[in-house]
Image: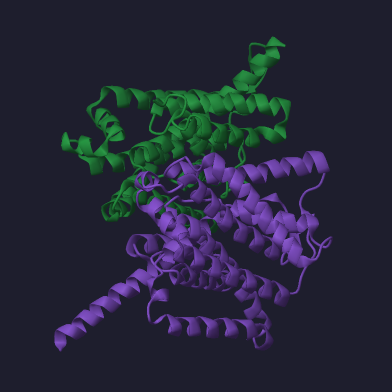
Amino acid sequence: MDITTLTSKKSLVWWVIILIIFILLAFVPLYAPGYAAILLISILMYVILTVSWVMFSGSTGYMSLAPAVFFGVGIYASAIIGGKLPFPIVVGIGGLASFCLALLVGALTLRLRGIYFAIFTFGLVMLMAHSLLFWELHVTGTRGRFVIVMGYNTIYYYLLGIFVLLLLTAYLINRSRFGLALQSIGQEEDAAAHTGVNVTMLKVTTFAISAFFMGAAGAVMATKWTYIDPFIAFNPFYSFMPVVMAIFGGMGQLFGPIIGAVILTYLEEFLITKFAELYMLIFGTILVIAILYLPDGLVGLIQKMWNRYSERKHADT
Amino acid sequence: MIVTFLDIVIAGLLMGGIYALIAVGLSLQYGVARVLNISHGEFIMIGAFGTWMLYKMVGINPLITLAMCGPVLFLIGFFLHKTLFRSLLASSASADIFEAKSMLASFGLLFIIQNIAILTWGADIKSYSYLNYGVNLGGALFAANRLVTLLFAVVISTAFYLFLAFTRLGKGIRAAAQDPRTAGLMGVNINQVLALCFGFGAVMAGLAGGLLSMCYPITTTMGMEYTIIAIIVVVLGGLGSIVGSFIGGFLLGIIGSIVTYIEPGLAMVSYYVIFIVLLLAKPTGILGK
């Protein structure tokens, strides 16, 4: 993630634009029809998952397939304690549960490098789902749980709040020495360790912070579904989508993953409603094409085209 | 007691044969071609449905179908690598980037293949009955089709192992598994070898699918479960070690059988626990250096 765009002299303009976008977003449920709120909820959910994924994996280069774990932990936390405590506390507990799990998992596994880490985190999703299913079937004697449902507007504002917090956190991390150290891990971990960066502490902390937001989002999203079970909550799909969205959008800039998440979520919703039978086929094809032809994502492509355009302009004059 | 034990071990071997075949396939694709093929299970599904369709509609013996499915799947895998993964390999700056990209691309393939399969064959559970009678083996009773499955899994794996060990091309594949760059410098046509490996991997998956369809009901969404098992076995045997995958398959089959005997609901959980403990303790696998 590159922060120079936000700290340069243009930064004031950017801040104003971002502020306007958020003010507009805050008023959407008041004016937009019901479907728009549902669509925006899906978009916000994926944006949160993607940005928090990039926060850890984008800068350190460790490809985590664990978003579904942390998202699922949030969902289950919300299903278990929802209704017994005030909703903000439920969301906080969902995030904290994921945070603690991520600390544990991170401390155990972040010495695995490369693809091993990806495989491990993917296995973790399925381990959670199967263990929980076993627990439910044999210990509590149930399958799944009912969740106390919230209104779409409530869900929307909570997600928006989480998103704002997440952006602020990502921004502050990027600005700090902490963020710089993280990027040094992504570039050359051994060299980073030699120059005095506490590599393990950094990785584990960032992993846990990103997990917090995924868990909080899960806790909110649980209230959208009336019923959840281990395979709904711990669905590997939620691990892959953030990765795909981040790559599609481009990870070079902070807003790349956001754009990727917005476009792909809209596409997903559009295809599911219009071409339900061909949804996976079209989505898969777009995914393969994006990986093949958009190495730096959409944002990278736009930048390349912009550079070419401005070069030509200079050449003409 | 001994009969029960024998019972469990043989049941484990029967399942293990399939696991071994699937894992050897993935080991070729991941260990040699460096593609962690998430869509591996979809090739298993294609093999299973191909066999089912030919048996149900034309009445062809499933064991003959194996010989027909093999070449078709080989061509699919071969050309997939020649086109998709070849250009990914060319555009990736490092091996790590290629691994991440090719894994995501195979995730896209999973979507595409599964959607086409659902459109063609529907989403219901399918099955047929073939060689479905009991055989008495040392006091324990086993279905004939499962014994045939085990036999074929062992024969196919052994044939492939001999191919790797004693032919020139096999030597090329083993060299590419150790170090693709150096193998290329030594005159191995590396792009060809990687595509061949991917093709062979698809064949293994397809054959395993055909064998599976003789014993178990099949659905178009069955692939993911087997992909995960294959990944676990490949890690268990050591990435890139084909013999390791073969042994690992039987090992996991037996472990699964023991756990199923104690508590059926925990079989899948036990696989993951083994997998995670192994990754933490010895990520190079049982035969890894």
Work out which quarter of the rendered image holds the C terminus of chain B and state it. top left
Residue at 42% x, 44% y: name it: A114
- State the residue in front, A231 or A315: A315
Where on the picture, by quarter, is residue A82?
A: bottom right
Task: Report which colour depicts chain B.
Answer: green
Where on the picture, by quarter, is residue A154?
A: bottom right
Name the spot of residue A299 as percent of width and height, x first.
38, 71
Q: Is residue B13 among what the camera can see?
A: yes
Whether B89 is drawn above or below B231: the answer is below
Work out which quarter of the rendered image holds the N terminus of chain B and state it. top right
Residue at 56% x, 62% y: name it: A49
Where on the picture, by quarter, is residue A105?
A: top right
Residue at 28% x, 53% y: name it: B93
Name the spot of residue A57 as percent of width and height, x first.
47, 55
Judge from the rendering whether residue A296 lies leftward or rightward of residue B226; answer left or right.
left
Residue at 45% x, 47% y: name it: A199
Judge from the rendering whether residue B248 lies leftward or rightward of residue A231; answer left or right.
left
Task: Report which colour depicts chain A.
Answer: purple
Name the spot of residue A171 as percent of width and height, x first.
49, 68
Q: Is residue B68 among what the camera can see?
A: no
Whether B213 is drawn above or below A226: the answer is above
Q: How many marks?
A: 0
Name the spot of residue B159 as percent of width and height, x first.
37, 24
